[in-house]
Amino acid sequence: MKELVIDKAGKLGIHLTDEQADRFVRYYELLIEWNEKINLTAVTEKDEVAVKHFEDSLALVMLRDNDIVKRIIKGESVKLIDIGTGAGFPGLPLKIAFPNIKLTLLDSLNKRINFLNEVVNELGLKDVETLHGRAEDFAKPGEGREKYDLAVSRAVANMSSLSEYCIPYVKKGGYFIAYKSEEYAKGPEKEEAMKAIKVFGGELTEVKEYRLPDSDLFRCFAVVKKKEPTPKKYPRKAGTPSKDPIK
């Protein structure tokens, strides 16, 4: 697994130290161990986890021209929140590869938060905060609202709902980057979310399609820049963005 992770990261231009690679191996071991108790992932084979979880999470570096991603690659301190993180993707792989990230992991299921806490402790990661709750609740004034340089989310919801979950956390000038399937770039979801993105103070600046190196997996990033503060009435109460997305 160690050589596999080093190879996959290397294909993205990320050069892991032995210590970082060992952390990925331990992360994998904990993922498999906990997956027997709680449902974390359907992907469990080493090769698949290395590509579909680790490499896919680290693929953020393909946005090399993005201001915030540039800072991450340079090793600068960036405040990042991973919303609906699940088993820690993409936030934890990014933190392992780029230790200067100040990471917040937010998830609505406490069992997953317990897993994430064990991973963070076992791996000895610093500047990682875990939050149990709904995205709508922690985006209130005085909580996490407009405190982050970057919000990320992977395979959580449609882009309209996701924008209401994530954009309120981003400070003006920062970014929300959604990990999406290749269908997003070509399907109706992109156009249907344009109004929501604008309402919450964002602007879709890029849709980057890419293929994970040495695989047949095609993905895309939806890159949203925070142009204006999110109006105070958003996000709406928990559950509303998914039931009644703005379109």
Image (cartoon, rainbow, N blue to C red):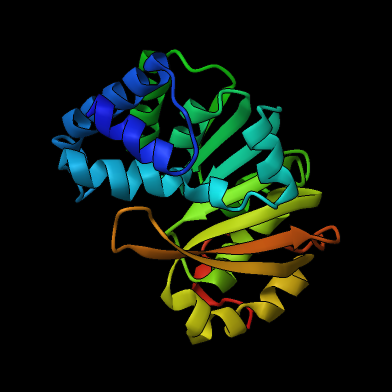
Tell me if 20 is positioned left or right of 200 in this view: left
Position above or below: 177 against 116: below
Q: Quadrant of the C terminus?
A: bottom right
Q: Nearer the viewer, residue 116 or 190?
A: 190
- Tell me where residue 159 appears, x and y as whole percent: 55, 70
Q: Residue at x 16, y 34 (%)?
A: 37
Relative to 69, 21 lies left or right = left
Can residue 163 be seen here? The reply is yes
Looking at this view, is 185 or 197 the one in front? 185
Q: Position of residue 173 (x, y in %)?
A: 82, 51
| Up/down of 208 relative to 4, above or below | below
Residue 113 location (% of width, % of height): 40, 33
* Residue found at x 86% / y 61%: 228
Q: On the rendered image, what quadrant is the N terminus found in?
A: top left
Q: Is residue 53 above or below residue 101?
A: below
Residue at 60% x, 84% y: name it.
Answer: 191
Residue 221, quarter of the rendered image: bottom right
Report the front residue among 106 and 235.
106
Horizontal arrangement in the rendering, residue 66 relative to residue 39 (left or right): right
Q: Does residue 30 appear in the picture of this structure?
A: no
